[in-house]
Image (cartoon, grey):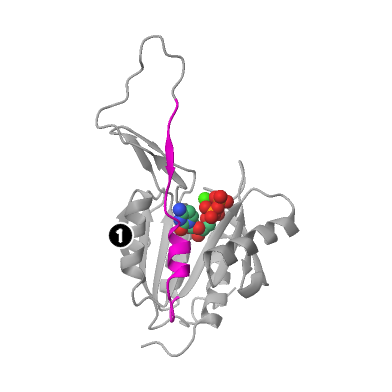
Amino acid sequence: RVGASARRDLAGRRVVVTAGGTREPLDPVRFLGNRSSGKQGVALAEAARARGAEVTLIAANLEVADPVGCGIRPVSTAAELQAAVIEEALGADVVVMAAAVADYRPATVSESKIKKQPGEDGLTLELVRNPDILAELGHAPHDGTLLVGFAAETEPDDERLVALGAAKLEAKGADLLVVNRVGWTEGFARDENRVVILGAGGAVLDRSAGSKMSVADAILDVVARHLGGEPD
Ligand code: CTP
Ligand code: CA
């Protein structure tokens, strides 16, 4: 894709990207997390910057270096990510929810390190649901803000994978949804990715496979086509 980033088709646009994986604390030394490295979100931030956008990256526990030329807001928990993205989404042209947000958090956070108890042979954790940040943004009026969600799915069958993505796009009120097959060896922490990009009604708008940077540019091609009006 020679020239994709030379296009500067996002000049004057404000783009907010969430990346990485949230961590939900159990006690001062432990958390529940996930395997998202932040690579795809960071590639999106870098690619959007290269295409002329003003980019804010909401960075949840990245395992890769921060992108240059972007505003960075470090967060750790889903609650922190929610507060940051709600604030940054105001006046944004595009919000990309690439972060892997924990669906649950421990019901209570122990102030001291949880100790093994004599005679116990197991521990049961009670978890409570986190808010669905993308659905909250999608169900609030968001005129002028293109909302891009991701879907991480382990479904092996392509048709069913797309159907799961279409259902998520609908349920969350996203404008675009990037479906990503994940597994023990796919998606998370790798340098390559393979995605299907869905639009209104779950229509397949594009497919992209390759480096996370080339996938980022393919996603931003679709984003650029969907942006309305002129940048201010
Ligand atoms: N997401 C979010 N808030 C959450 C969970 C997910 O905003 N509490 C966002 C993710 O950032 C992603 C999209 O929702 O853009 C889909 O995330 P995913 O985990 O694939 O879907 P879920 O709706 O959480 O469904 P499930 O994990 O049960 O498949
Ligand atoms: Ca989830």
| Residue at screen point 58% across, 71% down | 218
Image coords of residue 139 (percent x, y): 47, 69
In screen coordinates, is 71 left or right of 125?
Answer: left
Going 42% across and 42% down the picture, which residue do you hit? 128
The magenta segment: 124-145
Residue visible at 46% across and 66% down? Answer: 96
In this rendering, the answer to whether 105 lies above or below 218 is: above
Number of numbered callouts drawn: 1
Q: Position of residue 57 (x, y in %)?
A: 37, 63
Rendering quarter of residue 192: bottom right
Q: Secondary structure at mark 1?
A: strand
State yes or no: residue 228 in magenta. Answer: no
Q: Quadrant of the C terminus?
A: bottom left
Q: Report the amino acid beneath label 1.
A: Arg
Percent of width and height locating residue 225: 55, 82
Q: Position of residue 146 (x, y in %)?
A: 48, 75
Can you identify the residue that label 1 sits on? 73
Residue at mark 1: C-beta within 8 A of ligand 1: no
Q: Is residue 28 left or right of residue 167?
A: left
Observer-nearest of 44 and 29: 29
**Residue 13: which quarter of the image?**
bottom left
Q: Is residue 124 above or below residue 129?
A: above
Q: Tell which of 41 and 139 is nearer to you.
A: 139
